[in-house]
Image (cartoon, rainbow, N blue to C red):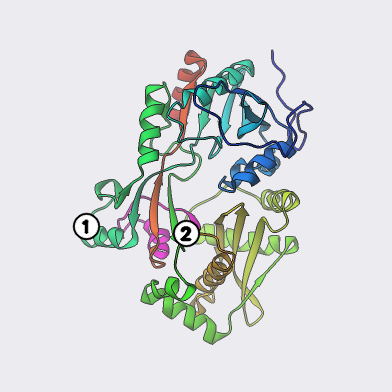
Amino acid sequence: MVTLLPAPPARPSVTAVPAGSVAPAGPADRALRVAPLTEDAHLAHLDGRGDAGFLQYPSWAVVKEAWRSEGIGWFDANGAVVGTALVLYRKMPKVPYWFAYLPEGPVIDWADPNPQRWLAPLIEHMRARHVFTVRMGPPLAHRRWQAQTVKDAVRHGLKHLDRVTPDEIDPLGATVALRLGDLGWRASGDGADAQPRYTFELPFEGRALDQVKAGFNQEWKRAIAKAGKAGVDITVGGYEDLPAFFDLLQVTERRNGFRLGRELPYYQRQYRALNTEAAGRMKLYLARFEDRLLAAHTLITAGERVWYQTGASTDHGRGVRPSHALQWRMIQDVHERGIPVYDMRGVSPVIDPDDRLFGVLRWKLGTNGRVVENLGEWEYPVQPALHKAFRAYMSIR
């Protein structure tokens, strides 16, 4: 039986290319191989690209301490790293096989017309690791809806984005979906994805900050003005503020009727791991009014991408609009850094005003951004019988 990597933060002791040997993918007729990767080489590839999600950075393995992990690389004929992935492993009960998960990865050349050149060596590596199922989340968009399109659909009584004609179908995402299907990969299924399939983006390309704000609806403009007039104070906190943030998060969960299932140590571990990897990778923004903490939001940066991850607020003091004030400050900071898109993370595709899930989307629509349906997560049955049993088990949980 193969021995997987130890739980994080341990890293494989292997000989890999130097951190500086990062190159673009070679011609499609050149074979690639997959092998374990040093953390330095992994980070060098991700930082060299600048477009990878934070879930593919080595620090995320430290956050997901219940999983075993491995950083792998795709090497071309010259030994240069041309692709990478963070792989998380979970053992299947009672049998010596593992479930492998690549959150929002791998980070490879998805525009290559021959994806099997990348995926075949991945599957062989997984087979050597005694993996029965591989699940990956290609970091690609599939469809997009502008805010006005969604608002018009709500006005016309439509209840789900699947009923709304998108403003854009991403050609690369649509093509990759077809290619994956031809190669035996299957979409995980509606509601099975671990990461949000639908997200909300606020694009900044070619727009000054005042133009971005001009696109906000009247509710957002009034809320920002009201918070400013009331004297809501926005600061960037630190590790010591995480317990107060978590207290607010518990209030938010009770108020909105959901449970993220994470405890304070999770956020403390995340803050330490991400900021150890790169200073300022995770920030905690705080909104206070009359010396009382009313709201707190987390912001994550990796390369040229930024995400609003988690928001929390109290039940009182909402009249001075602390959450709008926080987001406006975060938007200003992201725009000032020249980041092209602010990712406001997950939303529900349900657009029924009577549905509880619509509230988050409605709030984000006020920024005049766009809803993105991502390609979602895909699975490959390395061991078909065990994969079938796993899928049956998941369906009855």
Q: Quadrant of residue 337?
A: bottom right
- Asked if one can make out residue 86 in the rendered structure from this viewpoint, the answer is no
- N-terminal label among 1 and 2: 1
Question: In the rendered view, does 312 fall on the left or right side of 240?
Answer: left
Secondary structure at badge 1 equals loop
Amino acid under disc 1: Gly
Secondary structure at badge 2 equals helix
| Residue at image location 59% in from the left, 16% down from the top | 127
Amino acid under disc 2: Asn
How many marks can you see?
2
Q: Nearer the viewer, residue 251 or 8?
A: 8
Question: In the rendered view, does 15 fall on the left or right side of 365?
Answer: right
- Residue 168: x percent and y percent? 31, 49
Check residue 256 in the rendering and tell me which mark sits there, or answer none: 2
| Residue at image location 54% in from the left, 35% down from the top | 108
- Residue 100: x percent and y percent? 58, 27
Please identify the quadrant where the N terminus is shown: top right
Check residue 157 in the rendering and tell me which mark sits there, or answer none: 1
Which stretch did the figure color magenta? 342-364
- Asked if one can make out residue 104 in the rendered structure from this viewpoint, the answer is yes
| Residue at image location 55% in from the left, 70% down from the top | 332
| Residue at image location 38% in from the left, 54% down from the top | 371
Give above or below for 233 relative to 275: below
